[in-house]
Image: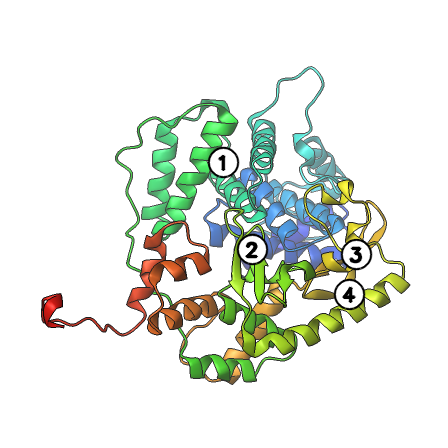
Amino acid sequence: MIPIEPNLLKNYKFVLQANKIPSNTHGYYMKWLRFYLDFCHKYGFRKADPGSLPPFIEKLRSKKQNSNFLQQASHAVQLFYSLSRQEPASKPYTPGVDSTQNVTAKENEKRLTAKGYTRETTSAFPAEAPISGEPENPKQKWQKAVAALANEIKVRHYSPKTLKSYRTWVYKIQAFLNSKAPESLDSEDVKRFLTHLAVEMKVSASSQNQAFNALLFFYRHVLGREFGKIEGVVRAKKRPYIPVVLSKNEVHRVLENLPYPYDLVVKLLYGCGLRLFECLNLRVNNFNFDGGILTIHDGKGKKDRTLPIPESIKTELKAHMERVYNLHQMDLAKKYDGAFMFDRLEIKYKNAGKEFIWQWFFPAKTFTYVKESKENRRYHLHETHVQRAIKKAVGKARLTKRATAHTFRHSFASHLLEANYDIRTIQELLGHSDIRTTMIYTHTVKSRTLKEAKSPLDL
């Protein structure tokens, strides 16, 4: 994390005291400032640009920070912005006096209050509240545009991750263009931004393409117009990517170092070729042990598919389901409010969340309290817990490869291909729309192609 420069730290402490921030919270304010500066450095925002505040707050929100911390972080950053409107302190600071402008703390507070940077500020973006009878400023328009973007994505039932990534790119182009009014954006703005990503930020080709798709969606469905021709954009170089694949021995070494239930999660990732979110979103009713079939609902692209349940772990899966049933009985005894449901299913079937068939196959260890409805609900295992467990097991197994949860999906496909399974069968099992996506695994196995050309009559 980037340390705060001594001179900046001295000036910032002065602003904290000038705004009568309680001394016992100074450490928190400086922590938020460090986080903010690190965020700007990492994501290429200008640290003195207020347009970087909304994406920073959104980043903290994605880290599950509560509303009080979000308000405090917002206030901390806004006080930092006030430094750009003051002369830097050149003399030692004396409590209660601004050594550079020779005004009292009370007078300085009045000056900052007039600019909207006071400690009474409680909302995430307090200085942006519209004044009755005045036109909206560009920042308010961007906030409305981002809200409209969220609505357009939700109405199309895109995944929350798509919303998160698209919203991030919209925030980035807002900061890049210094909050230029959304309705005045044109194709030249997009060209400059995409070129900036490739040349200055040195992003990967996939990130640049994701930015392009996000902005295309934003222009088309939020701003209501097309890009036009996008020519002359410097493209990031796309290098051929060969996924990391573990050998069968390496997979078993990792499994040996995984505690329950994470070992069972990884066995499904490898044994069925699941994506991590597909595995954690499994519910009891996805399993048909009699038919030996696992049904995946709403996979990537909202597609369903069926997979064979591995015979070697069927007993473990049944034993795990018995534990889930016992946990469900204890939850009912505690009069919990059910498992989290999706879309409007719970409105249609009010008691579905309490039925056993709708319980998560990998339930979280504790309840999640919902403030709005004052309910105790059960969620599934968090993906970060699984990722940490895998990383720890990979370290214990002393692998020489960088293995993640998705590596087991790559290994599933490669090992099937190595066993001479048809590539189209593997495509269906993985849920790929395009065979070209599956063809990448031909590079992860040894070539068995005969080099000498022969007639089929001579084979």
Q: Are marks 1 and 3 in contact (CB under 8 Å)?
A: no
Type of amino acid under label 2: Asn
Lower sequence index among marks 4 and 2: 2
Label 1 crowd (10 A; few <14 / some 14-19 / many >=20): many
Q: Which residue is mark 2?
A: 7
Residue 98, can we see it?
no
**Is there any visible trace of residue 363 in the rendered image?**
yes
Quadrant position of residue 155: top right
Residue occupying image coordinates x 51% and y 80%: 254
Q: Is residue 400 left or right of residue 354?
A: left
Q: Amino acid at mark 4?
A: Thr
**Cα–Cα span, label 4 and label 2:** 45 Å
User: Which quadrant, please, contains the N terminus?
Assistant: bottom right
Mark 4 to mark 1: distance in Å?
39 Å
> Are there few (<14), some (14-19), or many (20+) residues within 10 Å of tag 3?
few
Q: Is residue 13 left or right of residue 49?
A: right
Where disc 1 sits, the SS reads helix
The spot of residue 6 in percent (x, y) is 56, 59
Is tag 1's residue or tag 3's residue first in the polypeptide sequence?
1
Residue beneath disc 4: 366
Say what secondary structure mark 3 lies in. loop
Q: Is residue 458 above or below residue 211?
A: below
Marks 3/4: CA–CA distance? 18 Å
Q: Which residue does the image show at 30% across and 65% down from the upper left?
A: 442
The circle on residue 174 is 1
Mark 3 or mark 2, earlier in chain? 2
In this rendering, the answer to whether 104 lies above or below 33 is above
